[in-house]
């Protein structure tokens, strides 16, 4: 039952309106003046009906007090007015009143206006509840951990999430830098806006400018239509530049200008466009070393390194292995699968050069290739690091792969396309280099971003 506070100095009108509302099923609380009405706000009414013209505190002041004292959600206010004060009623609506009723009003008109006001309030409450549910859903970061190191990191994430300052996330490959970035986004006021990830190492240098800043149709060969670019696509939300150290040196000053001016210049356009986004970057490289060796601009480095989050490697947080292993087992369809203590012990003693990604890939293989509902150390030995079937991240990489040579004697040539041959060469080089993309690119004498582009193209 909705509760309505009725404020009017006219006793007879107050009694008639109170009767109409009570008969319609509402709980009515009456007040004969503005001061008394404000006191009765402590009963938390769902709706307030107030006359505008009253001795002492008038209806306008009552309305202003209600709005000012309830910033998180004032009850809707309907003002009652005579023909001579319609202008005041309009001013009241500008000040926050839901509607007004001209005296004398009919019963149906009164009940319809009250019903509309309560219905509107109910919709607003439902929307607020749904927004809160959405925010809670987004705030489930997806990170699984028990270790002190990751707990400290997540406390830092919560501290920086509310800011729009640029964040630099560092850590070894496979530690979960994108997940930490998503946590920064999901815990921020921008949580319901776009999250746009870009891998700077996976896009050829000649396409990077248009990919980031956008382009106009016909601005270069192959530009068949306008493109907003990743930066403008992240408007209102978060742009995540992974492998930021791979950003071509020629584009670094342009990114710096966007960060300083909050404006972007699409390729082929003379128009400068405003953009609002929060930038989070990640790298496994030592950017200070990159700066010292001239591969990364010092001014951009300091602009990116406003807030720094470093993710510890898995070998430094072994207490996370069990909960991560159970999480991945469920993720890979092993709802009824358990793991033996001996297996968990072997997992804890492994070096995990590929970090969480390596653990995840190993878990997927063991779950899919299991021979029963219990994963044991035998499975680890049969399908784990020594089997030769594990993903590149867990291969033992040679210190100097260029001295090993690439086995090409049995490379198929008859009836094999150049594409298939290239795929096989890359596969063998990756295996030889232990899955390390930088070593593989160096070994094959190709730029790292070209290798990454091929890896994604061929589905490695």
Image: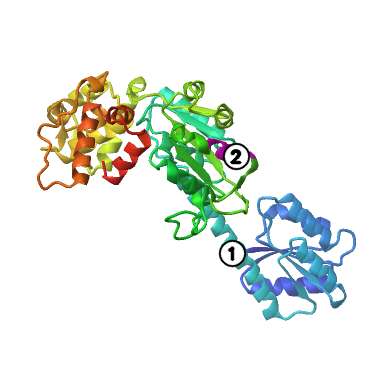
Q: Is residue 337 visible to the viewer in this orientation of the structure?
A: no
Label 1 – label 2 distance at C-alpha: 54 Å
- x then y, percent, for residue 341: 20, 25
- x then y, percent, for residue 316: 36, 20
Q: Is residue 142 above or below residue 235?
A: above
- x then y, percent, for residue 432: 21, 27
Category of crowding for the residue at label 1, using alpha-carbon neighbours closer than 10 angstroms: few (below 14), some (14–19), many (at least 20): few
Task: Say which element carries label 1.
Answer: loop
**Residue at 27% from the left image edge and 21% from the top image edge:** 351
Judged by its main secondary structure, the magenta piece is helix
Nearer to the camera, 128 or 441: 441
Category of crowding for the residue at label 2, using alpha-carbon neighbours closer than 10 angstroms: few (below 14), some (14–19), many (at least 20): many
**Residue at 34% from the left image edge and 27% from the top image edge:** 320
Question: Mark 2 — residue?
Answer: 259
Quarter assignment of residue 12: bottom right
Image quadrant occupied by the C terminus = top left
* Start-end of magenta stretch: 252-260
Q: Is residue 154 above or below residue 264?
A: above
Question: Mark 1 — residue?
Answer: 1
Q: Earlier in the sequence, mark 1 or mark 2?
A: 1
As for residue 127 lying within the magenta part, the answer is no
Nearer to the camera, 306 or 75: 306
């Amino acid at each position: 039952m909705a509760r309505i506070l009725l404020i009017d100095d006219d006793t007879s009108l107050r009694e008639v309106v109170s009767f109409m509302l009570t008969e319609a099923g509402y709980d009515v609380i009456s007040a004969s003046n503005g001061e008394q009405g404000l006191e009765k706000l402590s009963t938390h009414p769902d709706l307030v009906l107030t006359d505008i013209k009253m001795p002492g505190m008038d209806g306008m002041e009552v309305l202003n007090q209600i709005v000012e004292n309830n910033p998180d959600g004032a009850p809707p206010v309907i003002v009652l007015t005579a023909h001579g004060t319609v202008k005041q009623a309009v001013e009241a609506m500008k000040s926050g009143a839901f509607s007004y009723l001209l005296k004398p009003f009919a019963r149906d008109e009164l009940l319809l206006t009250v019903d509309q006001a309560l219905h509107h309030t109910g919709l607003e409450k439902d929307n607020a509840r749904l927004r809160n549910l959405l925010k809670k859903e987004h705030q489930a970061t997806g990170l699984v951990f028990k270790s002190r190191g990751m707990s400290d990191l997540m406390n830092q994430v919560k501290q920086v999430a509310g800011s729009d300052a640029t964040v630099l996330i560092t850590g070894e490959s496979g530690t979960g830098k994108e997940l930490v970035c998503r946590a920064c986004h999901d815990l921020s006021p921008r949580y319901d806006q776009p999250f746009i990830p870009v891998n700077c190492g996976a896009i050829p240098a000649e396409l990077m400018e248009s990919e980031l800043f956008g382009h106009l149709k016909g601005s270069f060969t192959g530009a068949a239509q306008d493109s907003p670019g990743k930066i403008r696509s992240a408007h209102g939300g978060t742009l995540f530049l992974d492998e930021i150290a791979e950003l071509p040196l020629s584009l670094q000053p342009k990114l710096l200008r966007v960060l300083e001016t909050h404006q972007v210049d699409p390729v082929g356009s003379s128009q400068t466009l405003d953009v609002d986004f929060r930038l989070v970057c990640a790298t496994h490289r030592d950017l200070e070393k990159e700066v010292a060796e001239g591969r990364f601009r010092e001014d951009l480095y300091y602009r990116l390194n406003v807030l720094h989050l470093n993710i510890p490697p898995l070998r430094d947080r072994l207490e996370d292995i069990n909960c991560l292993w159970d999480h991945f087992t469920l993720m890979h369809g092993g709802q009824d699968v358990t793991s033996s203590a001996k297996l968990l012990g072997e997992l804890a003693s492994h070096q995990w050069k590929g970090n969480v990604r390596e653990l995840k890939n190993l878990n997927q293989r063991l779950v899919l290739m299991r021979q029963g509902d219990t994963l044991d150390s035998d499975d680890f030995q049969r399908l784990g690091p020594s089997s030769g079937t594990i993903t590149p991240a867990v291969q033992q990489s040679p210190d100097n792969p260029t001295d090993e040579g690439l086995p090409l004697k049995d490379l198929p040539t008859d009836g094999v396309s150049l594409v298939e041959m290239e795929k096989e060469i890359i596969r063998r080089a990756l295996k030889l280099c232990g899955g390390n993309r930088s070593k593989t690119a160096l070994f094959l004498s190709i730029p790292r971003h070209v290798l990454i582009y091929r890896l994604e193209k061929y589905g490695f």
